[in-house]
Image: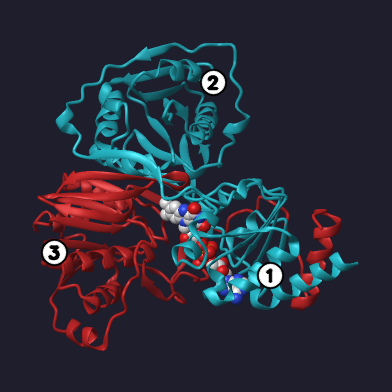
Chain colours: A red, B cyan
Amino acid sequence: MNIFVCLKQTPARDSVIRFADHGKRIDESGLTYELNEPDAFALEEGIRLKEENGGKVVVVSVGPERAIAVIREALAKGADRGILIENDESFQVDAFAIAKALAAVLSEESPDIVLTGLQADDLGFGQTGVILAELLNLPHASIVVKIVEISDGSIRVRKELESGWFQNIDMPLPALLTIQSGTNKPRYATLMGIKKAKTKPVEYYSIRDLGVEPLRSQTIENFYAPPKTKETQFFEGSSREAADKLAEKLKFEARIL
Amino acid sequence: MSVLVVAEHHGGKWHKMSWDTLVAGQTVAALLKTELSALILGAQIEPLAAELATHRVDRVFVAEHELLSEYSSDGYTIAIQQVIGRVSPDLILFPHSYFVRDYGPKLAARLNRSFLNDVIDINVKENCIRFTRQLFQGKINADVTFSDDLPHFISIQSGAYRGDTLEPTGNFAPVEKIDVTIDPTDIRTRYGEWFRESKSKVDLSSAEIIVSVGRGIKDPKHIPIAKGLAEALGGELAASRPVCDNGWLPLERQVGSSGQTVSPKLYLAIGISGAIQHVVGMKGAEKIAAINQDAGAPIFEIADYGIIGDLFEVVPALTEAILAIKED
Ligand SMILES: Cc1cc2nc3c(=O)[nH]c(=O)nc-3n(C[C@H](O)[C@H](O)[C@H](O)COP(=O)(O)OP(=O)(O)OC[C@H]3O[C@@H](n4cnc5c(N)ncnc54)[C@H](O)[C@@H]3O)c2cc1C
């Protein structure tokens, strides 16, 4: 099986986000980065598919040079080959351009299955996989929580629906799946894996050379902190003092004690 | 400029977000001083179309086809593409539902357009439309403009506009049928019945007090800290999704878009950041209290009471304080 997994490098989950140029940009100076959380589950799903069905796992990322770290991480966990499509912009990008870049590279390959995370937790589009399926003319399922079975060139997956409902979907391969967080237990890289990763091939492209046009269909005019919709009463002091004040409020104002 | 809202339903019932999206459409149509149409797709949908026609729209389009009787990304994409070809809207609003997540960006891409999801506000200034959406799981807002050609495709976040206040009027907007052609072979996916994993034994929707615990609790061995507070308050214990995904608490205690929707008198969120998918499940609470070490956590945007601090110190202290009050 030719398994492709798309990965994005995103700011670490608990990052404090600061602005620069009066909110025109995000200040990247203090940020650390990690593999986007849902993508870690997509990667694990891809590696398991290889273990069960044989084949190769190729990981592809669009991002600045630093995104090579998530490719190396994936190679250390068991992916066989990496592709980095370099794009200097971290936050002024839209999913359409990213999907076009991925499609330009993947259309030269012959994937049996393409996996993405269901969304990147920074920009929160949740679109890249769905658009990529369209551009590659593949059937797809989004918000997949389980690959139920693969047989005779078709695949059955379980998709999450709203409010705790699920549904199985059958479709022919090749196909694209966007994977939900929490669906498996992503493995850690072993020391051996990290060593081996150094010898695995990585190809580089630049998003401009791939002829992606336009690079931007949407522009973020400014970033800012969300306005509060409620007047929050904050309780300060030591933990005990704050807790006492909150308990008082719960009794006398919220009247729930 | 003309505005089209795509309304969603399942099993003969409206998706609640359809009304939020309709209100967003009414708001933006008024700002642009233009007409508002609504589209409904499916099979045997006359009653729904008639109901839609009484909800302050100028026109209702109906695309009926046997192959639209159940949702499919291929079927919806093909059908709406044909409707767009016929009625040429300039701005198309979708509810940000799971279905729309599944076909909206695909439809836009097929027409060589980008898609803007999770819009929470729309402003018009000198004929330029600015859309507000949230980034970083709700920590940041951004104002976005399109640079591609019309039509623009956007989806509206649940609850961003208040559809629950929308009342039918006595007026019926004209309902127009639009023929769509779909071939069975166009639909590459086969969809099974909807099901739930297990019948939930816990009904959080009637709980008056809920203590809800998030990933900030860090390890299952700390769950008793939250449980102790829930017991002191006489409330139910609930959780955000990662806590249930990790198996620290059973799935039936999950609150949010893929879990339960609750509206207690008090919702006390511990170590929960307040991502939209969580918030849609609990923002109907009468009072919301949050304990979080990050002053910028989005949960504080909707909290009535907040303590910025370490839950491992604050929660035990709060449990003691509550027990002391109860003993008095
Ligand atoms: C399609 C879809 C459906 C989803 N459905 C749901 C759903 O139904 N329910 C749901 O909850 N989520 C759902 N999610 C996930 C959601 O987007 C968030 O990822 C999730 O809600 C985050 O959970 P959290 O707040 O517990 O964790 P995090 O976002 O990681 O937040 C942890 C918080 O704990 C705080 N913290 C850490 N340590 C401490 C400490 N010592 N003291 C105090 N505070 C501390 C941190 O500051 C942070 O704010 C869904 C996502 C998608 C894409």
Circle 1 SS class: helix
Q: Can residue A4 be seen in this view?
A: yes
Residue A126 at x, y = what percent? 36, 52
Residue indicated by mark 1: B228
Q: Where is residue B169 in the image (x, y as percent from the top left)?
A: 59, 16
Q: In which quarter of the image is residue A85?
A: bottom left
Q: Nearer the viewer, mark 1 or mark 2?
A: 1
B177 up-or-down from A31: above or below: above
The answer to whether residue A222 shows anywhere in this view is no
Name the quadrant containing residue B49. top left
Residue depicted at 34% across the width and 53% down the height: A94
In the image, the residue with mark 1 has its CB under 8 Å from the nearest atom of ligand 1: no
Q: Mark 1 lies on which chain?
A: B
Q: Does the Cβ of the disc 2 residue fall within 8 Å of ligand 1?
A: no
Amino acid under label 3? Asn
Q: Mark 3 lies on which chain?
A: A
Front position in the image: A246 or B203: B203
Which residue, given by chain and number where applicable, does mark 2 sit on?
B55
Which amino acid does the dot numbered 2 rest on? His
| Residue A53 - label | 3
Q: Quadrant of residue B79?
A: top left
Considering the numbered disc 2 on the image, is that residue within a helix, a strand or a loop?
loop
Q: Quick one: quadrant of the C terminus of chain B?
A: bottom right
- Give the CA distance from mark 3 to mark 1: 47 Å
Q: Nearer the viewer, mark 3 or mark 2?
A: 3
Cα separation between marks 1 and 2: 48 Å
Q: Residues within 10 Å of mark 1 (few under 14, many from 20)?
A: some
Q: Is mark 3 on a helix, strand or loop?
A: helix
The residue at 22%/88% (across/down) is A192
